[in-house]
Amino acid sequence: MNIINLKKGFFLLLFLFLMPSSSIAGDLLLKSYGHGSFLIKGRGKSVLLNPFKAVGCASNLIEPKGVNANLILASSRLADEGYNPKDKLMFVDPGIYKFRDILFNGIEVPHDRVGGRRLGMATVWTWEQNNLKIVHMGGAAGEIDINSQIMLSHPDILFISIGGGFKSYNGREASEVVKILKPSIVIPVHFVRGEKISDDCDFSNADLFLKNMQDFKVKNIGKSFQINSKRIDKNTIYFFKD
């Protein structure tokens, strides 16, 4: 190898060493806005999940306004999970949608425990970003059929409601869904931290869920976190800070 090639190799190694790890590994950034809303960003594409109006169980939170995202994925058009006053690109109805090189698959699931007769149907989303399979069940409270179980199974990251009430899985129901889908990482949403938020909120805390998830490790993290597809945790629950 001549001196020029040696110099090129040295500077390439130096560049890779100095480059932020997220640029090399393609880390997936997850940022929480509370309730069930997250920004998921990776490889030049960003997805905003379930933006909310500050009402009901989200009444003490700051609405995720002005978030720079390519598109919104919403469980429904309810104000606490599909708030889109500026009419940004939003996928909310079941079906398959393509944005650039990502396919988003929306699957219909009851939004309540009576087959959708009270609140209609919610949309559960699954897609792949940064080589990670993601499933968002923030608006689900009903049973998922066998075909949906197959499509949603073995995600790397599963967002799931755990707080109970009339439009969310309770802790026991959520743990049963987790055991069926077998995710690596579980991110609980829609539950109360500390004292009850308001009389309009029927969520409980995370205790019942954790009681039924003793085979999983628990990590309490901040408002944002990066996940590397090559170093993903197994059997871990991430609690984000609201």
Image (cartoon, rainbow, N blue to C red):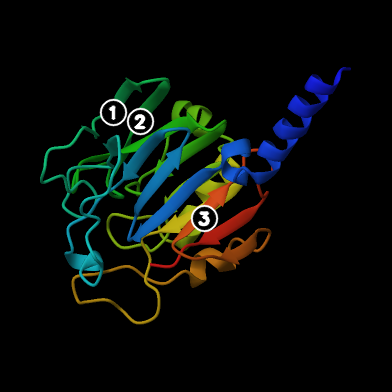
Determine the image quadrant of residue 117. Answer: top left
**C-alpha separation, residue under disc 1 versus residue under disc 2:** 5 Å
- Depth-wise, is mark 3 or mark 1 nearer the camera? 3
Disc 3 element: strand
Residue type for callout 2: Ile
Residue type for callout 1: Pro
Earlier along the polypeptide chain: callout 3 or callout 1? 1
Q: Which residue is mark 2?
A: 107
Earlier along the polypeptide chain: callout 2 or callout 3? 2
Q: Which residue is mark 1?
A: 94
Quarter placement of the N terminus:
top right
Q: Residue at x 27, y 58 (%)?
A: 166
Q: Which residue is mark 3?
A: 225
Of residues 168 and 54, the one drawn nearer to the viewer in this rendering: 54
Of residues 163 and 55, the one drawn nearer to the viewer in this rendering: 55
- The picture places residue 127, in percent across and down from the top left corner, at 45, 30
- The picture places residue 199, in percent across and down from the top left corner, at 19, 76
Q: Are marks 1 and 2 in contact (CB under 8 Å)?
A: yes
**C-alpha separation, residue under disc 2 versus residue under disc 3:** 27 Å
Q: Is residue 155 left or right of residue 121?
A: right
